[in-house]
Image (cartoon, rainbow, N blue to C red):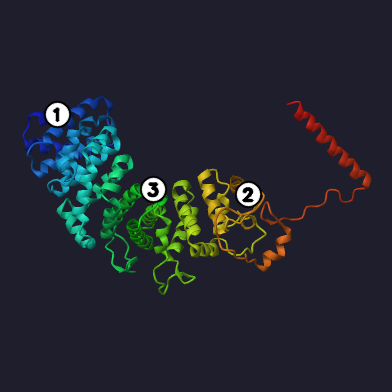
Amino acid sequence: MELDVLIDLLQTGDQEVVQKALLEFNKEYAQCFFFKEEERERRKRMGELLIDFLGRDLQPCSQLASLQAVRILSRDKHALAPFASRRSMRALAQLAGIGGAGGRGPGKVPDGEVASEALKCLCNTVYNSEAAQAAAGEMGLIHGLAGRLKVVDGGGGGDGDAAAAAAAVGGRDASFYALRLMFLLTALLVEARGQLARELRGVALLTDTLEAALGLRWLDAYEVAPDRPPLRRDQTDRVMEVLKILFNITFDASRRQVDEEDAALYRHLAAILRHCLLIDSDSKERTQEFHGHTVNLLVNLPLMCLDVLLTPKVEPGSVEYMGMNMDTVEILLDFMDKRLDRGLKLRESLTPVLNLLTESSRYHRETRKFLRTRVLPPLRDVKNRPEVGEALRNKLVRLMTHVNTDVKHCAAEFLFVLCKENVSRFVKYTGYGNAAGLLAARGLLGGGRGDGKYSEEEDTDTEEYKEAKPNINPVTGRVEEKLPNPMEGMTDEQKEYEAMKLVSMFDKLSRYVERGY
């Protein structure tokens, strides 16, 4: 379908003729993501005419064909002007069901497929255009999206009720793209992030949405029923979008004081996130991604509210330590181990879980003691360097000399906290050479301990370690083979000669340095 023909039809043709032409265009360009530069102005003109066409009283099938064409054209970030204006954004928002008065509430209920396509168009345009982002902020689109969310999930009646409500305002597909648009707005616009977090009580709203999407059944205030079927693919998609939005609007929650009401809300959210860590998605890869978003959000929550991760009763099959349920900590440890083995993008994939385990260990004594039994058990292997091997300790010590500063700092900090910030214990498990970076940064190269407050417990050494301790090289952290004495077999005269030769070499080096060579 030639663009010039389509432009003529949009200007003069009737609804049925235009719809037929658009269907042909959509089929031809369905998989087109790269566009000819010489046709850019014609694409812009076609975009303007499509927005005008959508302003007419159209049948849903004509609206759908027009929006599909807009979605295709909005892939070209150099030709977004027709869709990024406030007028165009308002028209798309109305069709998406999020464009009430001034964009501050849901509009009239649109056809499900039409709403979905309109939301896809808005996602493309907002993602690629700063002008569209500004228009979305001025229109208060985040209010319309929050209003839509209240209609879909406001009842909190579980997954079945949420799905039925979603069908009434655009179906599950539209619900997903509404969440995707909300994520983009909170990621790209500071103002939208603040509005959702404060004015619209976004944490409470999205916690209800998350609970409904998961279809949770509660046994106690902070304990979810243990029935944990794997999430469906569409369920996982929806839940991950909610987790990403919550991450955007809670980024400063761990750094500020929270009142009792907020603390109760964050504890409720933490209990839901505990459930998220204990369930699987539709594949191993997707489960890892899902758990990754869960961990990212847990890092944002106030530490005082993470006690609910350990409060569920110990059940048969649970991991128990000091009378506490350690299922969540065990899963986080396994998650970290898998990320270590993958070795990809460690700054993005590993540092969040390392930070979470480090701060939880500082705040919760039981968590630290349990992690120490898993990561730093009593030393037995003193023949190999601490970084050699496939145990968790070995993998983490290897990271202490990683090229990425954030990665090596997080790994060292985690091990240091597990050692209760005791320098001699830290060196014992990592070797002075690996530990030097963190110790220098803390001003602890001469020994001592960090600022953390920990109980005074004695370190327990194995018989193997006690026996080998006098022969362990503190720099490498292992027993080194004794090197032969280079002066063995020399006469006193030979020893004196070698000593004088060494003095002469030092003298030459000193003069060389003084001359500035």
User: Residue tagged by mark 2?
Assistant: 444
Compare marks 3 and 2 and give the one earlier in the sequence.
Answer: 3
Quadrant of the drawing holding the C terminus: top right
Q: Is residue 368 above or below residue 2?
A: below
Q: Is residue 72 left or right of residue 324?
A: left
Q: In this view of the protein, can residue 461 be seen by the observer? A: yes
Secondary structure under tag 2 reads loop
User: Residue tagged by mark 1?
Assistant: 7
Q: Amino acid at mark 2?
A: Leu
Secondary structure under tag 1 reads helix
Q: Are marks 1 and 3 in contact (CB under 8 Å)?
A: no
Viewer-closest of 39 and 123:
123
Spatial CA span between label 3 and label 2:
30 Å
Quadrant of the drawing holding the N terminus: top left
Q: Amino acid at mark 1?
A: Ile
Residue shown at the point (67%, 64%) measured from the top left: 465
Q: Is residue 387 above or below residue 136?
A: below
Residue shown at the point (82%, 35%) measured from the top left: 505
Q: Is residue 440 left or right of residue 255?
A: right
Spatial CA span between label 2 and label 1:
73 Å
Viewer-closest of 372 and 291:
372
Label 2 vs label 1, nearer the camera: 2
